[in-house]
Amino acid sequence: MKRAVRLSPERQSPMLGSMQRASDPTDLLQDALNESAGGFVELRWHKKTTRGLSVEKGRVDTATASEHSGVGVRVLESGTFGFASTDRLEKGAILRAIGEARTAARASARARRERVPDLPRVALARGRFDAPGVDATLARPIEAALEMLLEVERGARASSSRVTSASTGYAEIYEEKGIVTSDGAKVWTRTVRPEFRVIAVAASGGEMQRGAEAVGVTGGWECLFDGRSANELGEKAAKQAVDLLDAGYPEGGRTRVLLSPALVGLLTHEAVGHTVEADFVASGSCAAGRLGTRVASDLVTLCDSGASEYHAGAGGTMAVDDEGVLAGRTTVIENGFLRSYLHDRESAARSGVAPTGNARAWEYDDEPLIRMRNTYIAPGTSTLEEMIAGVSDGYLLDGASNGQADANGEFMFGTREAYRIVNGKKGPLMRGVNISGSAFDVLQTVDAVGRDFRWDLGSGHCGKGQPAKVDAGGPWLSCEVVLGGRKS
Amino acid sequence: MSGTALGRAAVKDGATTREHEDRLLSACEALVGLALRAGAHEAEAFATRAEKSSASFEKGDLKLAHVDEGSSIGLRVFRDARLGFSATNQFDLESLEQVARNAVALATASPADPANRLPDVQRLEMLAPLVHPGLARLGIEEAVDYGHALVTRAQKHDARISVDGANSSVSRVAQAIHTSRGVRATESDAMVSLSISGMAIQGTDVGGFHYASDAVRDPARIEASLAALVDDFAGTAVGNLGAESARGSYQGLVLFSPDALLDLFVAPVLGAASAIAVQRGRSALGKRLGERIGAPGFSIHDRPHDVDLAGAGSFDREGQPTRDFALLEDGWLRGWLYNGYAAAVENRLSTGHARGGARSVPSLGTHAIHVAAGSGGTREAILATLGKGLLVQRFSGSVDPASGDFSGVAKSSRWVEGGRVVAPVRETLLSGNAYQLLARIVSLGSRAERVDGGARAPWALVDGVNVTAG
């Protein structure tokens, strides 16, 4: 039975006043930049406002609103970058930070062997870019989210006597950035990224199992629950926890699997995406020196995009990166051939190509790093039913948990649910396991690509020294991996 | 107090450690006052100031020199036992007033919980100052020097080493807390942190990725730490070259490094020992207090006064005193970890395990974990006990906190035969149940090693682990 979330208008109030103030900071940044000495200077004002709620067993554990704002300053001096920051949006403080960044660059220049080349001349962003959903999300009272969390958590706990505990969480990151560079960027962007998660724990006979569902988007509330309502996600998490109590373990070994869009997202992000980040490539990742060569089956086309391709709301959507470069779409693998790496301005200059808009910083006092945005495998032509029918002995895997990959392309990621497939027939639920493989080897084994596309990695963060909101997804995919089963 | 006066808490002006602490404490006192005036019944303000100089290296060359300083202040309020929290890095009066209004508004919207109350004052036994005078003088030039030394030593170790990233930083942190119940404390800390990551490359063979890190407070120990760190990293990275599949899948003995032992077996126990997890029915160990859940000799303590470890400190995130805590002794489960909230649920005292920074509600966790050494001797002696099987240096995977089921990849692993390492191994998956395997720890090394500057643990030989060759 579906439950509707009830809102109580009389309890809603306009809240958290400073969070809704927004004014273009770029003129002030430009003034400061004009007064600084010559050379390359990049100023990035970044205000990050977060609202977060979490509920467990009817109790509110977190009800927070926080703001973190300031100006990050990067200069290119003596052939190297220096970075400093100030928490004040004032001309004097920004000029002092520019001075500190120059001092840092000069102090470190002796340790730099290879000087940073002139940054590539590109059309840098100017103007204002607002992602969808900003105003509507900011206007929504936090009480609405709190009522939803309490109701979904209560519902998950009530769904079965075997559910012993449930928790729900809502987080919303609102960001304003003003970026001004000495070579022409002058842009103000606003983005909002809400996310929702629900976890249920079921117990029986001294054993516990956990079910979890999470969604995260770039956009508004309607976008967040576009695919499934909060109550549906809660019901699914509770059912998963209960069902897993009675599920067996898959057998380990190398096997053919059908990966769900969430797991395809993990594969594209962890196993391929990181290895084509130009800084990893320079350090000798498995993608180094392989441009133009075959790295995957010809059924595989893999892209990273600042836009939300195929379906609205991808969690890593951004119009402009943190160097002021427009964030377009990069085709990384085209019909099996490696075509491009992901670049910031420095790596693009070294490689003699255009930057791809992948420079991102988590907060004002973080420097931009090469990061993914929305990474995906383009849809093919098969239905899921056709793909299941095509497997004689293997598994269908769904539900992404964590994932990691090394520079050599060896990846590991966790799955929540597994179903044995024998002679084209899907069997009962089994417990999720971790899978492993070598990225390009696995992509070479792809023999079918589904036609239905989904973004499914918009909640949580990617870590690379700094967190980043990204998304990843794709269609169902048939490939071969190593499964870490219980019995071998 | 004027906004200007508060604003100075965030200004870099060459002030002493004590002056920074005093400024943070003044800001906390002011914010608690604002919160009470805004309608809070109880209020706790926690503030931090961090000053950091760091150098990052990529592919063996300097990437960026970074100097930074900033402050944050967080406010937790209770109003009719309802929780609200707000934080900012802006210390002007207008911003702090907004923080107070936000926190009270959130509390007004939240449901009541009788355990929502602040802890009372407990007497603190302050550690000797954690900021070494020699470290207080270090800055960006030294950070660059340490990073450069990391890279050059690794490259000298073996020309096949490719340094993916190296980072060095000098950081100084001050913190202060003030609550409407009278808790009032400050402390400062300073550390040099070092890390290096990458792999060895020989022709088309890209060896498995490895990393190592450390953090030290005493400047006299930096050089030795740096040397040990690089030698561990480089030796392991070169050893990862020429990896092959494990020579067979099996269920049985696996030798885990201190790092892997902490990730795979200790971390789940710490999560399950959270009193909140127990109170809410999601701890797999919830009904096993007083039982022997681990093998004889397996002991886990939290030692927040071990100043050689990064998490050392005199008080926790709620201003409660930290102290040695026995979680597991000789395999026996001795107690749960409490922060103020969990303690209030049971009407008892906190064990000083509130964790977190100024930007979030206090959570619950440990400070400086010690896993006791055993009698298994050196790593070589335990290898002899293993005889044939897998040695795991890092675990890359997940442990389900509810069930204890784990599954993941053995990283930088080695195949052992005749009690000796015979080959590096790749694409090997491990699985099992962490809670069940605690009782199957066969042997613990005779030395507890520092892990990433934040914990101590020995090598451990564990039986019953599923190993799947790729």
Image (tube, coloured by chain):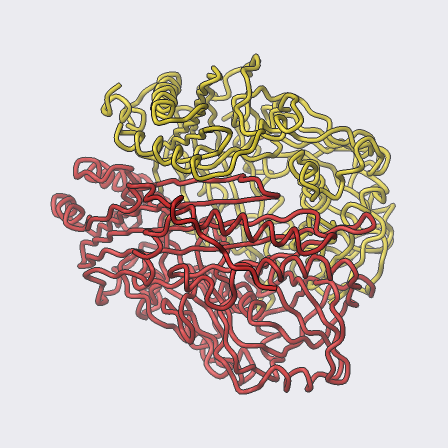
Chain colours: A red, B yellow
Q: Is residue A309 visible?
A: yes
| Horizontal and vertical percent position of residue A298 | 53, 85
- From the top left corner, tell me how far across and down residue A349 is, in percent: 31, 64
Q: Is residue A13 above or below residue A158?
A: above
Left/right placement of residue A57 relative to residue A80 reads right
Q: In this view, does B350 lie to the left or right of A87?
A: right
Rendered residue at 64%/36% (across/down): B276
- Image quadrant holding the N terminus of chain A, namely bottom right
Q: Residue at x 46, y 40 (%)?
A: A63
Examine the rendering and report whether any part of residue B135 can be seen: no
The front one of A228 and A341 is A228
Could you say which quadrant of the image residue B407 lies in? bottom right
Q: Is residue B100 above or below residue A43?
A: above
Residue at (74%, 78%) from the top-left corner?
A421
- Seen at 83% across and 42% down, the residue is B441
Q: Where is residue A200 in the image (x, y as percent from the top left)?
A: 65, 52
The front one of B83 and B199 is: B83
Instruction: Identify the image quadrant of the C terminus of chain A.
Output: bottom right
Q: Where is residue A78 in the image (x, y as percent from the top left)?
A: 26, 47
Q: In the depicted view, which residue is nearer to us: A103 or B400?
A: B400
